[in-house]
Image (tube, rainbow, N blue to C red):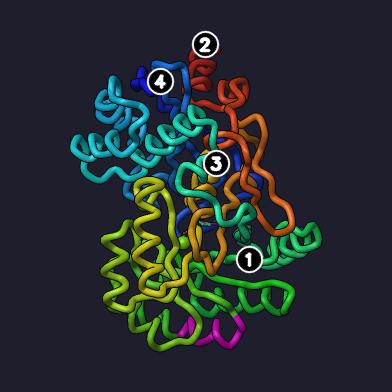
Amino acid sequence: MNATVSSIEAILVDLPTIRPHQLAMATMQQQTLVVVKLLSSDGVVGIGEATTIGGLAYGDESPEGIKLTIDTYLAPALVGTDATNVHAAMAKLNKVARGNRFAKCALETALLDAQGKRLNVPLATLLGGAVRTALPALWTLASGDTGRDIDEAERLLAERRHDTFKLKIGRRSVRDDVAHVAAIKRALGERARVTVDVNQAWNEAEAATGIALLEDAGIDLVEQPVPREQRAALARLAARFVVPIMADETLMGPEDAIDLVRGACADVFALKIMKSGGLYGTLRTAAVGDAAGMALYGGTMLEGSVGTLAAAHVFATLPQLAWGTELFGPLLVKDDIVTERPVYRDFCLHLPTGPGLGIAIDEDKLAHYRRDASRKSVALA
Ligand code: MUC
Ligand code: MG
């Protein structure tokens, strides 16, 4: 098969959220996606996405920086290369640029989407085959208000959309946060699993107090309680408490996974395609965790539909995915840029069956939500 990369476009897209989403380090009123369109000489177009949370508040790459990196360095390196050899193309990018995992993830996704379309197989098939087509997907309660969070959870349980809820804490005092979590758990009881994500906001002493109280409240899992650099503290907490501790920000790719396994730093790994620099990087990270007996969890950077389905295709292939996923990003935004939104039903995200990612861009919606379109209309007004 003969096809080379002809052109790559990286587009900033701003989508409003359905409500403010409050995390320890940012409150999101909108989500910004970097959507990548990769055109090949055989006419096949691949789509990819790079997404982060709160500009530079969460990860090392901002949406604007990702676009600049792709436009200036990565796209010129890929144009003219074999579009059908994803490993060779990514090796070339890794020579041109160190790091920049999120940007590389978008390009690898686009290459794989195109190759799936070319071969007429879903992306999961290209990765070796799906062992599940329905991925359990939790929902994050993060309105900032306990009563509103309980109402939201009750509605989603009744709709059979989610039965596991992650609470974002770390903004308030430990005691206020625990009171908020305990009230929600008391209201939902055994009908729902409740987990918390501290997003690195506690020091070790606060974490020791907080986790003890959360255990008493019946919380099922505690995610990234301490700063990502403090792996020894994470290990001490994992040894001290029965409730599973999940590594998120401290785990990027397979090299981190090896270190975290060696240090017995956590019980669960939050895998994310952005953090691992792509789909194959995620498989490598997962393999390290799986081999070490680490429970795996399909994480999100609150990607839109493109990034979410890219992650879903990868997570669908993992032999073990003990903690399910949090692939709810498309549900957090009011509108979408794809023709058919991902399907959520019976507490799961359902994998599309079409070739590649199995979705198509809605060009009118993309034109409406792309950031440069609004700039143009402001300039014309
Ligand atoms: C994170 O830190 O896990 C995942 C769900 C959510 O609400 O935020 C993300 C980020
Ligand atoms: Mg997290």
Kind of element beneath mark 2: helix
Quadrant containing the N terminus is top left
Task: Judge depth for marks 3 and 4 and give the one in front.
Answer: 4
Kind of element beneath mark 3: loop
* Amino acid beneath label 1: Phe
Q: Give the range drawn in magenta.
A: 209-218
Q: Is the magenta stretch mostly helix, strand or loop?
A: helix
Kind of element beneath mark 4: strand
- Asked if the residues shown at circle 3 and circle 2 are in contact, with their CB atoms under 8 angstroms apart, the answer is no
Residue pointed to by mark 3? 304
Quadrant containing the C terminus is top right
Task: Judge depth for marks 2 and 1 and give the one in front.
Answer: 1
As for residue 212 lying within the magenta part, the answer is yes
Q: Which mark is residue 245?
A: none
Task: Judge depth for marks 1 and 4 and give the one in front.
Answer: 4
* Amino acid beneath label 3: Gly
Disc with the residue nearer the chain's start (2 vs 1): 1
On screen, residue 302 versus residue 17, left or right, reads left
* Distance between mark 1 and mark 4 Cα atoms: 41 Å
Residue 363 picture quarter: top right
Sort mark 4 into few (<14), some (14-19) or many (20+) by Cα contacts within 10 Å. Answer: many
On screen, residue 114 versus residue 5, left or right, reads right
Task: Judge depth for marks 2 and 4 and give the one in front.
Answer: 4
Residue pointed to by mark 1? 165
